Amino acid sequence: MRSASSFKSARLAALLLTLLLTFSSLPQSVSFAQSCATTAENPSEVTEKTKQLFRLERLNLAGGAELLTIFGTAIPFLYSRVRDKRSAGNDAPPPIMDLAAADREVWNRFLWTGLQYLLLDSYGIPLKASTHTFRQNLSDYRKAHVARALALLSLYESETGTQSVFTPAETAEIQARLLLSDKMFGGIVDDINFQKVYEKQTTAVRDTRGHNWELLRQRAEKESLYFEPLEMPDGSATHALLWVARPDLEKNQGRHFDSRFLNIQNPWTDNRLPDWKGYTITRYFDADNRVVAPDTTGAHAVEMIPLALYGLDFPKIPILLVDFRDQLNPKRREMSHRVLQDVARDLLSLSSFANIPYFFGRVVYDFVTSRRGLDLNQMSRLRTYSQLKLLLGLSASFDPELRDDISRRLERVSLNPLENGMETEAKLAREQYGALVAYARRPDGLPARIERDRREEMVSIKHGSVERPLLRLANVLSFGIYTHREKATPELLSQLDIKRQLDFHAGFLRRVVKSTPQIEVVWNIEDVRRSLRFIAEHGSAADDKIASTSAQVFARTEDEETRKLCLNSLYRINNETAKKELLNIYRDAKLEARWREQSAEYLRLAIKEEQRIAPEDAKVILSLVNENQ
C-alpha cells in the first residue's frame, strides 16, 4: 500500500495529466471480417506494435510534485467548423478537469446556468441564442477531449504491459471523474462511489457494444452486406464497417432494401455503385464464404466497396458516422438534434420542465424513433466520433488509403466551430506540451501554482464548517477571482501532511467497509490494521466521517486485534460522533461482554479527560460511570 504522500503526489500528477497526440509512421496492416474471423497476426508482433503506440514521460517538479505525460501515436480530430486555430500560444494549456477541486465545476456550472437564464436570456433572441450555442460548443469540445483521455488512459494501462503509475483506486478515481464530468452533480460524487461508477459504466458500454454488434451483424447479413468490426489495440470493437461485394450489385439489382437500423440508401438501386470510382479493396473468400489468404486453394477474389461506418457503443442503436455515398447523411442526422433543441429552446422558449405538452411530445417521439431504429434527434455522436478519431491513429487494421478517406469525411461532419483539423490538432498538441513543460520548469509557474493550491488546501484546517462554505461562495460569486488561502507555516504544513494521510487511510477503510460484510475474508487484515493504527495515533485531527468508518469496521470484522484498534481509534478521536459510536457499541446487547466493558472503560476515560461529547450522551455516560463506581 502506498504512503499517503505518494498518493497525494499521484493525484496532483493526475491533475496536470496531459495527453499529447502526435503523428506516427507506424506500419499499417488491414484486417477484415464478414461475420467471420479477422486474419490473425503474430501475437508478439501485435504486442510490440502496441508498446510503440505509447510512451510515458515523467518530469519531477519543485515542491515534490510530478508531471506525467502520456504520448499516444494518434490523430486527434454554428454547425460546421470555420477555420483552424493557428497557434496554441505560450501559456500552459488548460486542464481537462481539476481532480483536486472537482466540485468547483459543479458550482461554476450552476452559476453560469443561473446567469444565462436570469440575465442573458432576457436580452432577446440574438444574445440568448449566441450564448447558448457558444456554451454548448465549448462543452462539446471539452467532452471530445475527455472521451479521448478516457480511451488513451484505458489503452495505455491495458496494452503497454508496464506497471501502472497509479494505484487501482487512483485509476478508478481518474476514470470516474472523467466519466462524471458532464453530469450536473458529477463533481460532488463521493469518492467511495468511484469504483462503482467506473465498473457500472464499463459494464454498460460492454453490453451496448455487444447488443449493437449483433444487431448490425444480423441486419447486414439479412441485406446481403458484409460486416467488419473495427478493433482498438486492446481488442475491444468500438466501430464497424459495412461493405457490399461488386458482383452482388448485378445479382441483387432492384432488390428491396430495409434500411432499418442501417439508415443508408438502397445499394441495389443506386446507379453510382456499378461505376464506383472511390475506395475499393479486394478480398479472397473460400467456398464457405470465409476470408482467406490469397494463396489459399480454391480462394476467389471479390472486390469490396465500403458503404458505411457505424459506432457500436452508442445507446439504443448502431449510430451512423460515415456514409461513403452521401457525406451529408450523417451530418443531417447529427444536426437534427441540435436544430430541434435550439429552435425549441431559443426561438420557442420551450422547456421539458416548464411545458408539459412539449415534455410528453418529446417522450413519445423519442420512444418511437428508438423502437423504429430511426437515427433522428438522437444524442450527440461526439463521444463516438472522438473514439473513431483515436481508432484511426491507433489501430493497425486500416489501409492508409481508407484511413485518409474516412478522416476527410469526418472533417466535413463536425458541427463544432471550435474543433480543429487533424494536422492542426496534432500541431497544437505539440505546442501546448512545450508550453506546459516550460511552465512546469519556471519558478513562478507550476511550482508556484502547487504552492498556492497547498495554501488553499490549508483552509480546511484553519476554518470550520461554517466559514468554509462562505469562503467558497465568495470564490464562486467572484468567478474565481477571489480565493482564500492561508499563509504557509511549518506547523500548517505538518498538519496538512497528517490530514492528507488521514484522508487516504479513511478512504481505504470506507472502500473496505462498502465492499464486504466480512472484512478478513476479502481484504488483507494487516492493511486494515495499519490504517486503524494511524487513525488512532492522530485521532485529534480525525473528523466525524472517520469515526463512523471506524465503527463500521468494528461491526464487519471478527478479528480481535482489529476490533481493539477500532475501539482505541474511537476513544482517541475527540469528537461527539466517536463517543456516540462507543456508546452504541456499549448498548449493543448482542456483543460479547468484553467488548461492551472495553467501550465503557473508554467512555469513562473520555469523561475524565473532558473530551467533546454531546450533552445527551454525556448524561448517559455519567450515569454509567456512577453505576460502576
Image (cartoon, rainbow, N blue to C red):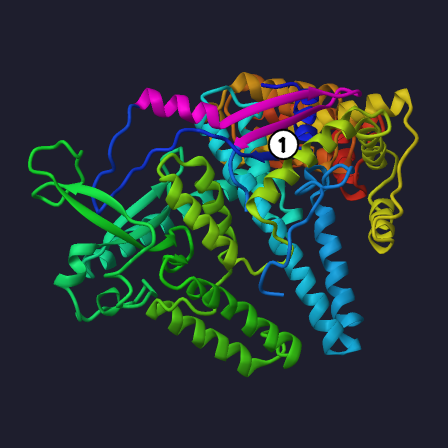
Closest to the observer: 508 or 311? 311
Closest to the observer: 584 or 51? 51
Where residue 328 sits, quadrant-wise, is: bottom left
Q: Report crowding for label 1: few under 14, some 14 to 19, many 20 or more residues within 10 A (C-alpha).
A: some
| x and y, in percent, of residue 455 in the image | 85, 32
| x and y, in percent, of residue 60 in the image | 71, 19
| x and y, in percent, of residue 374 in the image | 37, 69
Asked whether residue 590 appears in the rendered view, the answer is: no
Closest to the observer: 201 or 627? 201
User: Which quarter of the rendered picture does the C terminus lie within?
Assistant: top right
The three-letter amino acid code for the residue at tag 1 is: Gly
Q: Is residue 620 above or below residue 354?
A: above
Q: Is residue 135 above or below residue 403?
A: below
Q: Secondary structure at mark 1?
A: helix
Q: Please give left or right for residue 4 compared with residue 363 in the image.
A: right
Q: Please give left or right for residue 568 compared with residue 266 in the image.
A: right
Q: Please give left or right for residue 564 compared with residue 276 in the image.
A: right
User: Which quarter of the rendered picture does the N terminus lie within?
Assistant: top right
- Residue drawn at the location 60% of the way across and 25% of the way down: 595
- Residue drawn at the location 89% of the way across and 37% of the way down: 485
Asked whether residue 396 appears in the rendered view, the answer is: yes
- Residue drawn at the location 57% of the way across and 23% of the way down: 56
Residue 116 is covered by the magenta coloring: no
Write down the region rendered in magenta: 43-72
Name the residue carrying label 1. Answer: 507
Where residue 488 sits, quadrant-wise, is: top right
In this rendering, the count of numbered labels is 1
Q: Is residue 332 above or below residue 621?
A: below
| x and y, in percent, of residue 93 in the image | 72, 39
